[in-house]
Image (cartoon, helix red, strand yellow):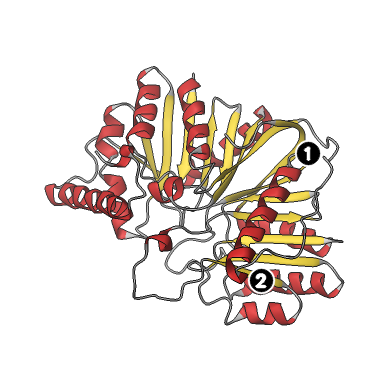
């Protein structure tokens, strides 16, 4: 695990963009020295414009503003809004810029999927919320259902180090030479609360399995209840076995999954796993209130995680991700209560043999699952847990 638990932090849960964006904008407007923002998507919409304007205001008053976006998720950003930001002295880098759309390359699958912000090295945001208007969800009930956390205290030093490390790598790769600046090393912040938390990343070098390992450790030691909410859920054999084993030993295991169809292949591939999980006693609830984008979990009312990592091979094996793991009963209870409310209001429990119910539906699900496994195999990134 790349992040060890540190005490003395203050961690606040932010539910959907209605809580996240006001907090982010206020932090940017209050910045005195540095703003660093990482995001997969940066939409040219009302929310994106508000964030861009805040970044410009910060740059104009002399704050060093660094923005890192993904070259696939924000593929047209540099030619549009990004150009305006650069003209206003915002430093912009693009992670793996897409230049050959018609040619498949393995590296195209390795994306920057984490969503992080660090303000003055004193306040950090970690979560799954992109810079996009989460009330703009055509055909579905708004808002996008997602979470982030605001962090203050000693742990911010690790988050600050992580964003600057990746900025350096991308700058080096883009300019093909070592950058001419040094990262400011922050002193350890004094305790500002009582919460123990760890910051975890997933990369393609030393930290390939840290987030998955943290999930598995929590699941394997759970005694009473496991509640996971995930937008894209396609766990490998080891993760499924851990959930099934926990359910069989008496834990109440619930997974809240996307009920709407967004990506056909992933949607039906996930449904191919329903029978195995339901047979072991795992409860599956589909969210039909709108667009589920959350990537969170609560175990035994004492362990919780919020971040960008889905429980699927793309997050666990390919993308750069970031999650915060919190050991705090009050925080875990707040997150659990929010998830329980969402399930009561918008959840539909999946019954054994409920879906896919027809032979055609089952065949479609199995074919979709097979195609996803084939794609992972062809990419040569997949581990043995996805080669069944």
Q: CA distance from mark 2 to mark 1?
A: 27 Å
In primary-sequence order, the first of circles 2 and 1 is 2
Q: Is residue 337 visible?
A: no
Tell me which residue sits at (70%, 64%) in the image.
179
- Of labels 2 and 1, the one closer to you: 2
Instruction: Name the spot of residue 365 as percent of width and height, x first.
Output: 22, 49
Cβ–Cβ under 8 Å for marks 2 and 1: no
From the image, tell me which residue sits under label 2. Answer: 92
- Residue 212 left/right relative to 384: right
Can you say which quadrant of the picture contains the N terminus? top right
Q: Is residue 68 visible?
A: yes
Find numbered disc 2 in the image and state the secondary structure of the residue it sits on.
Answer: strand
Q: Nearer the viewer, residue 179 or 39?
A: 179
Which numbered tag is attached to residue 128? Answer: none
From the image, tell me which residue sits under label 1. Answer: 154
Instruction: Name the spot of residue 311 as percent of width and height, x first.
Output: 43, 43
Tell me which residue sits at (75%, 67%) in the image.
65
Tell me which residue sits at (62%, 79%) in the image.
81
In the figure, 31 relative to 97: above or below? Answer: above
Q: Nearer the viewer, residue 367 or 252?
A: 367
Instruction: Name the spot of residue 272 as percent of width and height, x first.
Output: 25, 44
Residue 383, quarter of picture: top left
Find numbered disc 1 in the image and state the secondary structure of the residue it sits on.
Answer: loop
In the figure, 152 relative to 27: above or below? Answer: above
Q: Residues within 10 Å of mark 2 (few under 14, many from 20)?
A: some
Instruction: Name the spot of residue 30 as percent of width and height, x first.
Output: 84, 61
């Amino acid at each position: 695990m790349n992040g060890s638990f540190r005490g003395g932090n203050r961690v606040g849960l932010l539910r959907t963009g209605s809580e996240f964006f006001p907090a982010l904008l206020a932090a940017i407007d209050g910045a005195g020295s540095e703003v660093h923002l990482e995001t997969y998507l940066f939409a040219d919409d009302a929310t994106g414009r508000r964030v861009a304007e805040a970044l410009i205001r910060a740059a104009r008053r002399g704050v060093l503003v660094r923005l890192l976006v993904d070259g696939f998720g924000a593929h047209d950003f540099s030619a549009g809004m990004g150009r305006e930001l650069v003209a206003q002295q915002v430093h912009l880098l693009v992670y793996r810029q897409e230049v050959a759309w018609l040619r498949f390359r393995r590296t195209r699958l390795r994306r920057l999927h984490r969503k992080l912000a660090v303000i003055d090295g004193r306040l950090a945001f970690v979560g799954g919320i992109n810079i996009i208007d989460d009330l703009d969800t055509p055909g579905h009930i708004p808002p996008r259902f997602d979470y982030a956390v605001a962090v203050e205290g000693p742990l911010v030093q690790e988050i600050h180090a992580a964003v600057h490390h990746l900025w350096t790598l991308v700058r080096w790769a883009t300019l093909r030479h070592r950058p001419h600046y040094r990262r400011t090393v922050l002193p350890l912040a004094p305790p500002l609360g009582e919460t123990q938390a760890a910051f975890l990343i997933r990369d393609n070098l030393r930290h390939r399995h840290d987030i998955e390992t943290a999930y598995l450790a929590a699941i394997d030691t759970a005694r009473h209840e496991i509640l996971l909410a995930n937008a894209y859920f396609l766990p490998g054999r080891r993760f499924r076995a851990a959930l099934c084993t926990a359910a069989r030993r008496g834990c109440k295991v619930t997974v809240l999954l996307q009920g709407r169809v967004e990506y056909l292949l992933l949607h039906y591939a996930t449904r191919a796993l329903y029978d195995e999980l339901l047979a072991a006693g795992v409860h599956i609830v589909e969210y039909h209130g709108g667009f589920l984008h959350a990537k969170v979990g609560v175990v035994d009312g004492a362990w919780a995680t919020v971040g960008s990592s889905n429980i699927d091979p793309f997050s666990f094996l390919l993308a750069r991700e970031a999650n915060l793991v919190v050991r705090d009963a009050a925080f875990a209870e707040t997150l659990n209560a929010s998830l329980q409310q969402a399930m009561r209001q918008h959840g539909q429990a999946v019954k054994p043999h409920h879906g896919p119910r027809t032979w055609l539906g089952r065949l479609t699900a199995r074919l979709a699952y097979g195609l996803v496994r084939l794609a992972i195999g062809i990419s040569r990134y997949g581990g043995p847990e996805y080669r069944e």
